[in-house]
Image (cartoon, rainbow, N blue to C red):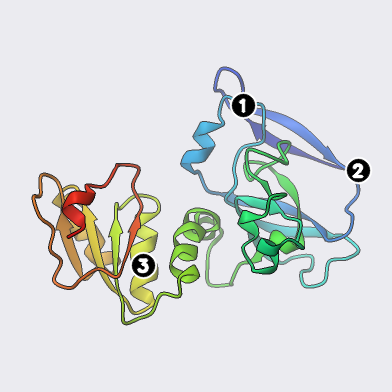
Amino acid sequence: MVSFTVYKGSENGAVVAATTEKPELQNDQVLVKVTASGLCGTDLHYKNANMGLGHEGVGVIESVGPQVKYMKKGDRVGWGYEHNSCEHCQQCLRGNETYCPERKMYGLADLDQGSMATHAVWREAFLFQIPDGLSDEDAAPLQCGGATVFNALHEFDTQPTETIGVMGIGGLGHLAIQYAAKMGCRVVVLSGTDSKKEEAMKLGAHEFIATKDAKEIKPSRPIDRLLVCTSAQPQWDVLVP
């Protein structure tokens, strides 16, 4: 039996400590000692729920199950929003396990654990090894926020010849700017005002456009792909010619 402390939401919104118990590791399960956790807006949605909080986790493997093949005790690993899938449906076989009808995701399954905890038990198949040059604190937010925008760029085969628009410079947008710039793309940032212009340019943007009250938006080059990283509804009539 494995026992560890988790931090859960509660009816009044207070975060409370609780104990989770798991049976001995089976198949490709891995016990991870948590060393860092990101804080995502989704976590705030569940602060009133009786469930383990956190889904941007990084930690060190303490023990492994009998069918673990690629990871070992002492490895640094991370995990994100999804914890499991069937691995045999059409979506899983295409590498799109986030669309698996049997997927297990944060807030819907494994409610007794999360990244805000001392430990967690996950499948090896849904853990990611963390490179040595990346700190735990920097790696944790990449497990969800980073993965969200990276997958959008990667899934649609973004090329260095393209111009990528990034709307919004929050938790997702500031990562999208850096990813697209590192991919060799020309990056155009769209934000309501100029207040984040200096930050956007330092992150790798090539052009910045303030959109508030704009009657027309004309970047110096046409935007090939637009990543909307804001909860605000874009002004499509201004953005689209």
Toward which corner of the image does residue 174 lie, by quadrant? bottom left
Query: Residue, x 77% and y 72% (percent of image)?
Result: 70
Q: Residues within 10 Å of mark 1 (few under 14, many from 20)?
A: some
* Tag 3: amino acid: Gln
Residue at 50% in and 69% down: 155
**Mark number displayed over residue 1:** 2
Question: At numbered mark 3, what does the secondary structure look like: helix, strand or loop?
Answer: helix
- The answer, for residue 79, to whether it is visible in the render is no
Question: Which mark is first along the chain, 2 or 3?
Answer: 2
Q: What amino acid is labelled 2 in the image?
A: Met
| Secondary structure category for the residue under label 1 | loop
As drawn, 161 above or below 31: below
Q: Quadrant of the N terminus?
A: top right
The quadrant of the picture occupied by the C terminus is bottom left
Query: Of marks 3 and 1, which one's residue comes earlier in the chain?
Result: 1
In three-dimensional space, the C-alpha distance between marks 3 and 2, rounded to whole angstroms, equals 43 Å
Cα gap from disc 3 to disc 1, whole angstroms: 34 Å
Residue of label 3 = 178
> Is residue 190 left or right of 13 when viewed as pictured?
left
The correct choice, above or below, for 208 with respect to 120 in the image is below
Q: Which mark is residue 49?
A: 1
**Residue drawn 72% across and 52% down?**
33
The crowd level at tag 2 (other Cα within 10 Å; few <14, some 14-19, many 20+) is few
Residue type, mark 1 in image:
Ala
Number of dots carrying numbers: 3
